Amino acid sequence: MSKVVFITGASSGIGKSIASYLHSKNYKVYGTSRNPQKVDVPYHMVALDVTKEETIKTAIEEVIKKEGKIDVLINNAGKGITGPIEDTPTKEMRDNFETNFFGVINVIKEVLPYMREQKQGLVINTTSIAAYMGLPFRGIYSASKGALELITESLSMEVKAFGINVVNVAPGDFATNIAAGRYHTPVFDNSAYKEKYAENLALMDNHVDSGADPIQMAKKVQEIIENKKPKIHYKVGAFMEKFSIVLKRILPDKVYEKLLMNHYKL
């Protein structure tokens, strides 16, 4: 029997690439979107908003009713946020955590009982290489994804006895439309960070525009699914993006901070 894959945020970007690729490899894929009727894809789509618990429950029950199981849950839905910490509205910070952190947890909580009953399952959380370091003007995004990295470690230990594996996949910059869906704190005229923030906004968008093909993420996800003993942490991206995590481990804090500040021209 084909493995049943449930992936949130499958209407565009990395999520769409993963879902399309797995569908082409004969997995039975169910993607989610807040407006699935507007999405033209070869795999099944169901309505789900990770910030609304009732839609999570309904979507999961729909797939279980049709397939009787969910073998793989891929938590891909998320959104970006940029801005100086001082200038970013606290409400927008909370909203970001509702999607990137609490939304993921609520999807996991709804799926775990079915996986326990099956005595097997795999949860893959899409985080970010930015989760491993606090980046200027992306601090809230780094924090929400970093929190998800740690929750994955905790959950992995809690559910191991039930035959369930939980892993992270941290992508670097990929050519997607994520920039269009970000919350950008405005560049306020009276902001102390006006010039540097404006420069870094352009730099961030350029990194995404020149990013790699998200098919790399799709292939890595399939590799994880096929691995009977997956690791907890995976990184997918350019060499220097992954190497930056190694440097953070081995360099003194101030030296690493200086490298980042030079990169972001601060």
Image: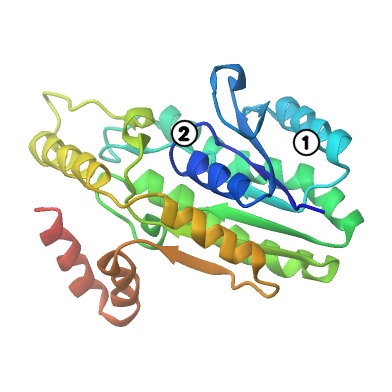
User: Which image quarter holds the N terminus?
Assistant: bottom right
What residue is drawn where x is 57% and y is 65%?
223
Dot in front, 1 or 2: 2
* 200 in relation to 48, above or below: below
Give the number of the disc on residue 60.
1
Left or right position of 59 against 47: right
Give the number of the disc on residue 12.
2
Name the quadrant containing residue 138. top left
Where does the image place residue 99, in percent across and percent down from the top left? 54, 36
SS at mark 2 in the image: loop
Mark 1 or mark 2: which comes first in sequence?
2
Where does the image place residue 134, in percent across and percent down from the top left? 33, 57
Q: Nearer the viewer, residue 232 or 209?
A: 209
Where does the image place residue 204, in percent across and percent down from the top left? 22, 43
Given the image, on which type of amino acid does mark 1 rest?
Ile
Name the quadrant containing residue 201. top left
Query: How crowded is the residue under tag 2: few (<14 C-alpha within 10 Å), some, or many (20+)?
Result: some
Q: Is residue 166 visible?
A: yes
What residue is drawn where x is 47% and y is 33%?
12
What residue is drawn where x is 78% and y is 46%?
111
